[in-house]
Image: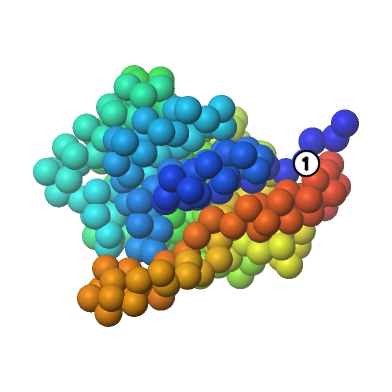
């Protein structure tokens, strides 16, 4: 049977973790606070993730905002990487930039080396998309032994960046260093086929989510919840997977 493309689902709740695992996500990115792009989840969430068979990679991001980190923040990130390794999870999701936008090779090397020493796979998150030259950033990631890169091709969503992603896929195919490219941001059932065939990726990434109903008006009024909060939707995962199963990888147009 021909292999279909793979789906990574990002989640930030216990409910989302269970739904993604039970509805066939090929991999889960475990976060807190997806409304700000994802932060490091609690160790309690990491422990819970070990109860599912689905591979889980943990976001390592100590705060919202940019990816330019202080020494104290780097120390926190190293500690959180150790926690993910102690739980025996599949990997971590990291990234760091310099003030001018390039990947911070020194910080990335420290984080990636710590993860590799703990037996973890490493995904580079969309700090990659901030880099002014994506192909130079790709070369940096390859030199550091990064396993995967999540990218929108430097655009505000992956469809807008599909041609740039395709160029990165071609660059990987013509290099001696394999690395997995994951197209993410703005993934829907309406565009997933076009995204995969245009970009040439074998992995896509999304939250598969819907707006979360407001259950407490007082919590909303006092600022403890937001109209922008979302919840993982089982039906959205099912629909995406059904479409993706009809897109064999060997049907992706020639790169």
The quarter of the rendered structure image containing the N terminus is top right
Q: Could you tell me which residue is drawn at 48 percent across and 55 percent down?
A: 134
Could you tell whether 30 is left or right of 117 in the image? right
Position in image of residue 12 (x %, y %): 42, 51
Residue that extends furthest to the bottom in the rendered view of this protein? 221
Nearer to the camera, 55 or 179: 55
Residue 254 visible? The answer is: no
Position in image of residue 100 (x %, y %): 28, 61
Position in image of residue 96 (x %, y %): 31, 49
| Crowd around label 1: few <14 · some 14–19 · many ≥20 (10 Å) | some
Where residue 98 sits, quadrant-wise, is bottom left
Nearer to the camera, 147 or 73: 73
Q: Could you tell me which residue is drawn at 12 percent across and 43 percent down?
A: 72
Where residue 140 sits, quadrant-wise, is top left
Give the color scheme: rainbow, by chain, secondary structure or one colour.
rainbow
Could you tell whether 215 is left or right of 168 in the image? left
Number of labels in the image equals 1
Q: Is residue 132 above or below residue 254?
A: below
Residue 64 visible? The answer is: yes
Nearer to the camera, 149 or 13: 13
Q: Which residue is mark 1?
A: 4
Position in image of residue 107 (x %, y %): 26, 40
Q: Is residue 139 above or below residue 208?
A: above
Where residue 74 sits, quadrant-wise, is top left
Nearer to the camera, 172 or 87: 87
Q: Could you tell me which residue is drawn at 67 percent across and 48 percent down?
A: 201
Residue that extends furthest to the left in the rendered view of this protein? 72
Q: Tag 1's secondary structure?
A: loop
Q: Could you tell me which residue is drawn at 41 percent across and 33 percent down?
A: 48
Q: Is residue 105 above or below residue 99?
A: above
């Amino acid at each position: 049977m021909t292999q279909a493309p793979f789906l990574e689902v990002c989640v930030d709740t216990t409910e989302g973790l269970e739904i993604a695992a039970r509805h066939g996500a090929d991999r889960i990115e475990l976060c807190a606070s997806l409304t700000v792009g994802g932060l490091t989840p609690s160790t309690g969430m990491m422990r819970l993730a070990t109860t599912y068979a689905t591979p889980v990679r943990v976001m390592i991001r100590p705060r919202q905002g940019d990816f330019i980190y202080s020494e104290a923040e780097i120390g926190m990130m190293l500690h959180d990487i150790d926690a993910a390794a102690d739980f025996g999870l599949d990997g971590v999701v990291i990234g760091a930039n310099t003030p001018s936008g390039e990947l911070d090779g020194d910080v990335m090397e420290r984080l990636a080396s710590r993860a590799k020493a703990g037996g973890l796979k490493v995904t580079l998150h969309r700090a990659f998309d901030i880099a002014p030259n994506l192909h130079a950033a790709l070369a940096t990631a390859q030199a550091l032994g990064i396993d995967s890169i999540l990218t929108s091709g430097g655009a505000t969503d992956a469809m807008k960046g599909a041609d740039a992603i395709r160029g990165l896929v071609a660059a990987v195919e013509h290099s001696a260093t394999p690395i997995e490219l994951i197209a993410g941001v703005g993934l829907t059932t309406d565009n997933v086929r076009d995204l995969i065939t245009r970009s040439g990726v074998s992995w896509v990434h999304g939250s598969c989510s819907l707006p979360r109903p407001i259950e407490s008006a007082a919590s909303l009024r006092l600022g403890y919840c937001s109209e922008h909060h979302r919840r993982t939707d089982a039906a959205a995962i099912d629909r995406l997977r059904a479409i993706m199963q009809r897109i064999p990888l060997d049907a992706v147009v020639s790169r």
